[in-house]
Amino acid sequence: NAGVTQTPKFQVLKTGQSMTLQCAQDMNHEYMSWYRQDPGMGLRLIHYSVGAGITDQGEVPNGYNVSRSTTEDFPLRLLSAAPSQTSVYFCASSWTGLFGPGTRLTVT
Amino acid sequence: GQSLEQPSEVTAVEGAIVQINCTYQTSGFNGLFWYQQHAGEAPTFLSYNVLDGLEEKGRFSSFLSRSKGYSYLLLKELQMKDSASYFCAVSLNGAGNNRKLIWGLGTSLAVNP
């Protein structure tokens, strides 16, 4: 059981670039979610999914897309990176929230 | 709107008991979570309360009063490793399995020797 894996661990982007943050879990959890965490802001829900083919918006979805073609994978796409998207991104699976190690993203 | 309030910082002594409060005002409530997060790491699940009352899990206990919009996390026999940030998060009602979590800003607990 690898738990929840996220790649990459660190990423630096230039404004306007796009990229995909990967998230995978091998526990057959239906519920998966993406959060961003900024200093002093706590965690904010970006998107979540309750099963393959089903996604919905969270609190701060603008600038991000998700898809859930399989139960295992839940990638997060940044369409056109902006400095305001500099943050730590966490993927979580299961209803109680088993978190991946996070991706530290810097947009210059 | 949705709001969760927690103290920003709490300080306690090793071996003591500390209580971290969380008050919430949300439209739709399904349950309340508590998470622990050490610096530079991912949050880890501590507890989930749906019904009123106290739930005990080892050194950690969590209390919920739905009528008062209030919860607390109680940590007993504090250890240095308990120094971390603690977050409350509310699960909002949604159709079917659609549930969103709204998080508080977190409470930084410092345990001193």
Image: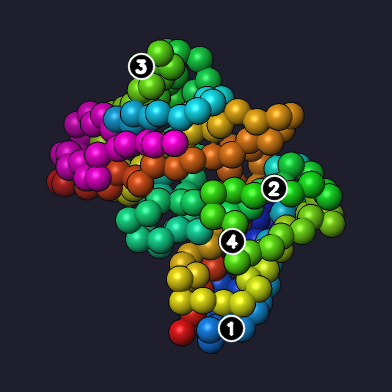
Tell me the residue that label 2 is attached to. Answer: A56
The image shows residue A50, relative to residue B59, as above or below, that is below
| Amino acid type, label 1 | Gly
- For mark 3, name the chain: B
* Label 4: which secondary element: loop
Q: Tell me if residue A16 comes above or below residue A48 in the rendering.
A: below
Q: How is the image coloured?
A: rainbow
x, y (%) of residue B84? 32, 49
Q: Are marks 3 and 2 in contact (CB under 8 Å)?
A: no
Report the Cα–Cα distance between label 1 and label 2: 24 Å
Q: Which residue is mark 4?
A: A62
Q: Secondary structure at mark 1?
A: loop
- Same subunit, tags 4 and 1: yes
Q: Chain of mark 2?
A: A
Foreground disc of the pair 3, 1:
1
Report the residue marked by disc 1. A16
- Residue B95 relative to residue B101: left or right: right
- The residue drawn where x is 52% and y is 25% is B29
> Does A54 sit above or below residue B17?
below
Tell me: A71 left or right of B61: right
For image coordinates 40% across by 13% down, the residue present is B67
**Residue A55: x %, y % from top left:** 74, 49
- Does the magenta portion include A1? no
Estimate the x, y position of residue B101 in percent, counting from the top left. 54, 40
Q: CA distance from mark 2 to mark 4?
A: 12 Å
**Front-most of residues A5 and B98:** B98
For the record, the magenta segment spans: B1-20
- Indicate which label's residue lies in the foreground, 2 or 4: 4
> Is residue A7 found left or right of B104 in the rendered image?
right
Tell me if residue B92 can be seen.
yes
